[in-house]
Image: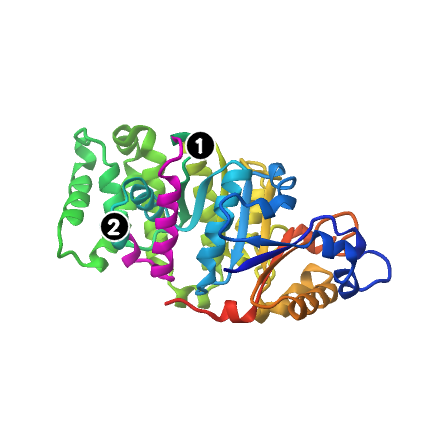
Amino acid sequence: MRFLILIPVLMAFFSGSSSVAQQLDSAYLQEYAQPINLEDPEYQSFGMLDTIVPGYSFFFTAEQHWRSINTQIQFSFLRYLHQHANVRHLIVEGGYSYGFLLNEYISSGDEQLLDKVMKDVPICPENQKVLFRNIHDYNRYLPEADKIEVTGIDLEHSPVLVLQTLNRLLPTEEPPRKIRKYITELKELHASPYYNEAEVKKFFKRFAKHVERHSTDYVAYWDKDFPIFAMIVENSVQGFQFTWLRSTLFQKSWQERETSMYRNFLTIAPTLKAGNYYAQFGALHTDIKEPRIWDFPSLANRLNFQANSPVNGEVLTISRYVRNMSDNYERLGEHEELQELVNTLESRFHDSVVLFSLIGPGSPFREMSKTFQFIMLIDEDLEADACD
């Protein structure tokens, strides 16, 4: 069993000449630091977060990719926020098609479908399988309105998943004559076991241009589902071109991706049932005020500050202390205080994940807390456990 150690929100004793290390030794923190049992379905030891989360509607936890502990933390926070913050939507760092098919799995429990979806997942597919099996089991006896739904807002990465999703969403009516050829080709590509992915990618480039030229006919055919359909097609063209090499060479690719994820959320949100949102994304996506490296707004920044965001001013981020990015915290302010706090916690807590608050009337992290309100510090041994 692993534990999260919660250092409470009310860190009034961080003021004055006392160091962070001295404050952690105080009777105050001895009384209010609580171990959180990750296996407790009631989450009674999360009590000091209970008064905070009702003030927010979109919750981020940050992850460092390729770590086995990611999905354990993700499922624990998802259950807690479901029970205490009206979270009904898990927003995933994957395309709409990925989320759509995962929802079908969560509803049906069809292991063949889960295997198919995870076959094309680029990061830790076996860990992801465990996560979504757990969500399936958790959902099973919940009322429909309370069930957790999965939604992907990232670029599309898998031609297989895109073809399957679009074909499941196809209207039953015959398409207008001007678009019939492309709809037929879409069906044939999905039905064929022999298609070449390069051909599919070329098709979507042509398809996107055709949708733009004949939008009236596509709107008539797809009706209220047209915004989702058009989003999938656009994200497929952009996503099939987004490679790690290209993104490394051209930072503009990251900026375009961040813009697309925000725009996708705006498209999808009106179609979802009532309820708040939880997402676990790579750490840089979750910085609210300013990202540690990027010179353009992160997804969390756009969600929290843009006027047309449905969660404007209601984003809470529980970030992750990333050791190999320690220098990048300097631009956020209070860097020395953060390092002292990290050193103290590492000396006190072993084999643990430590969650500590940057907010509160006496906190020294007044600038840094504008970028994230909490940070998780994960024991190096736990963090080092990688997944395939």
Q: Position of residue 110 (x, y in %)?
A: 25, 46
**Residue 323 locus on image (x, y percent):** 59, 69
Residue at (65, 51) in percent of width and height: 373
Residue 120 location in percent, x, y? 29, 58
Query: Would you identify the image quadrant in which residue 346 lies?
Result: bottom right
What residue is disc 2 on?
111
Residue 339 placement: quadrant:
bottom right
Q: Nearer the viewer, mark 2 or mark 1?
A: 2
Amino acid tagged 1: Pro
Q: Nearer the viewer, residue 379 or 282?
A: 379
Along the horizontal axis of the image, is 371 left or right of 186?
right
Q: Quadrant of residue 21?
A: bottom right
Residue 111 picture location, percent across and down: 25, 50
Q: Residue at x 59, y 43 (%)?
A: 315
As drawn, 23 above or below 86: below
Furthest-right residue in this view = 17
**Taking the image as drawn, is residue 159 in sight?**
no
Q: Is residue 380 left or right of residue 198?
A: right
Residue 72 seen in the figure: yes
- Could you say which is closer to the camera, residue 115 or residue 218? 115
Closer to the camera in the image, 4 or 243: 4
Which residue is label 1 attached to? Answer: 270
Magenta stretch secondary structure, dominant: helix
Q: Residue 332 magenta-drawn?
A: no
Q: Is residue 140 magenta?
A: yes
In the rendered structure, which segment of residues is drawn in magenta? 116-143
Label 2 vs 1, first from the N-terminus: 2
Q: Amino acid at mark 2?
A: Glu
- Secondary structure of the residue carrying tag 1 is helix
